[in-house]
Amino acid sequence: MKLMDETTRVQGREITQDDIELIRRLLAANPSRNRTQLSKDLCLLWNWRASNGQIKDMACRTLLMKLEQRGHITLPRRQTPGRGSRKVSIPYVPHKTAPIVCSLSDLQPVSVHLVEDAGLFPLFQCLLSQYHYLGFCSTVGENIKYIVFDREQNPLACLLFGSAAWKCAPRDDFIGWDAETRKANLHFLTNNMRFLVLPWVRVPHLAS
């Protein structure tokens, strides 16, 4: 195993040789735990949390993989294939596709529904996988999802927001952020990961 000569930053966190030793002890003491369980354990040991209080599990999992790639630790084998090794089948959810061509006032009131339960998620998943040019399988990390409906409860649009990228030079230069300012304020930003107005919807001023 490699020794870390100096402090390095991984996933926005300063990592020292003491941190590496802590991770190695955690791995050695829990040989039956998988990568997800270990990353959650490490988050709790470090009290590594987002501004909403949730542990930063995905960031921690990525941190562990990067440390393994650099030769500092050895993680347990994956229990399931990686995302690129299998095609995920998204179930089809019946929905109306009749053209909606009218003025915005004819649709109002338009309602924006938070997709936070099993009731709306299958439809959200189906619409994005069928009609967004990037498709959709699943979300990673912190995110928030919405479906927009007209007054007859016909779906009009889908929105997906996720955590902002840790580094983005054009964005950071435009805002005027240096590294420390970005670290302190990144949690105020979000990333618009998907924006879809369904292809049969033709309504001026519905979205921009």
Image (cartoon, helix red, strand yellow):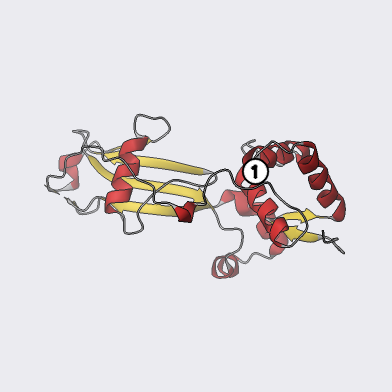
Which amino acid, by three-letter code, is at mark 1?
Arg
Residue 75, image x and y in percent?
70, 49
Query: Is 132 rendered above or below residue 106?
Result: below
Horizontal side of 46 relative to 78 (left or right) equals: right
Query: Is 30 rendered above or below residue 207?
Result: above
Quadrant (top left, top right, bottom left, bottom right) of the C terminus: bottom left
- Find numbered disc 1 in the image and state the secondary structure of the residue it sits on: helix
* Residue 34 in sight in this render: yes
Q: How many marks?
A: 1
Foreground residue among 121 and 204: 121
Quadrant (top left, top right, bottom left, bottom right) of the N terminus: bottom right
Horizontal side of 18 relative to 60 (left or right) equals: right
Query: Is 12 rendered above or below residue 158?
Result: below
Residue 122, image x and y in percent?
34, 36
Q: Residue at x 71, y 56 (%)?
A: 68
Q: Which residue is drawn at 72% across and 60% down?
A: 180
Residue 92, image x and y in percent?
26, 40
* Residue 101 in sight in this render: no
Residue 85, image x and y in percent?
46, 54
* Quarter of the rendering containing residue 40: top right
Foreground residue among 153 and 33: 33
Horizontal side of 89 relative to 77 (left or right) equals: left
Foreground residue among 41 and 188: 41
Category of crowding for the residue at label 1, using alpha-carbon neighbours closer than 10 angstroms: few (below 14), some (14–19), many (at least 20): some
* Quarter of the rendering containing residue 5: bottom right
Q: Name the residue under label 1.
A: 35
Q: Residue at x 43, y 33 (%)?
A: 116
